[in-house]
Amino acid sequence: MNNTFKAFLFDLNGTMIDDMEYHTQAWYQVLTGQLGASLDYAEVKKEMYGKNAEVLLRIFGPNRFSPEEIEYLSVEKEKQYQAAFKPHLKLIEGLDAFLEQAHQAGIKMAICSAAITANIDFVIDGLGIRHYFGAIVSADDVTTSKPHPETFLKGAELLGMAPEACIVFEDAPKGVEAAANAGMNAVVLTTMHAREEFAAYTNSICFAPNYNDPALRTIFFKMPQTFNR
Ligand SMILES: O=P(O)(O)OC[C@H]1O[C@@H](O)[C@H](O)[C@@H](O)[C@@H]1O
């Protein structure tokens, strides 16, 4: 194991599971179908980072919805997402063995996501992987979500780790920006965004389509075998 990193901070959506298309579809339906926003699919994809309340505020401004309406719309979007994605719920290729290997190597791990707690529970209990994580930071645990550094700094703090001992796993440019703002390097999973979209971020140390990528094995475990079990 490479001694530089003592903790792994995982983003969830798009990084541990390949579900961002399902989030985009659910947001597109709620924002344009239910709420009448004039956004095309690509614009929805670009605007849907961070907490659900932040997405609604960014698109509709501060005066459109009451806090109760925001909560209702957030839950509505996640109901649509969960119903559509549930049959496809599985870890990104190689991640099951990668988690086990990191665990065996004594690496501390946290989930640091902009998703609400109910969505994180849906994924980690649905997949039986909760025991790997010493801390979970959701949308409900932070004041401001990514690209603000709060989510990752809180994850590091809960694990008892200095930021420089942590490596972030992310799939979104705004998430890598949040890692940079927290003083952390990032491994980028290219599930939804192409490598070129991260050109602005010098803290991206590696790009991989999944956890069997040789670059990941070299960086973290210096081992030739794949993570397939
Ligand atoms: O921070 P994560 O795990 O990538 O989650 C991000 C996504 O979480 C979803 O729950 C939000 O509705 C999306 O708008 C957001 O992009």
Image (spheres, grey):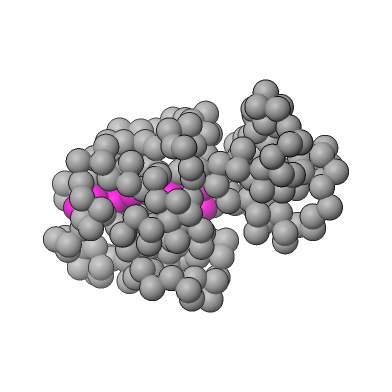
On the image, the x and y values in percent for residue 108 come to 23, 44
Q: Which residue lies furthest to the left in this view?
A: 3
Whether residue 51 appears in this view of the structure is yes
Above-or-below relation of 186 to 215: above
On the image, the x and y values in percent for residue 21 come to 64, 52
From which residue to which does the magenta span run?
A: 6-14
Please report the residue visible at 45 percent of the width from the left and 51 percent of the height from the top: 148
On the image, the x and y values in percent for residue 132 come to 29, 38
Please report the residue visible at 31 percent of the width from the left and 59 percent of the height from the top: 184
98 part of magenta stretch:
no
On the image, the x and y values in percent for residue 183 come to 31, 59
Question: Which is nearer the eye, 138 or 67?
Answer: 67
Whether residue 27 appears in this view of the structure is no
9 part of magenta stretch:
yes
Question: Which is nearer the eye, 213 or 81?
Answer: 81
Q: In which quadrant is the N terminus drawn?
A: bottom left
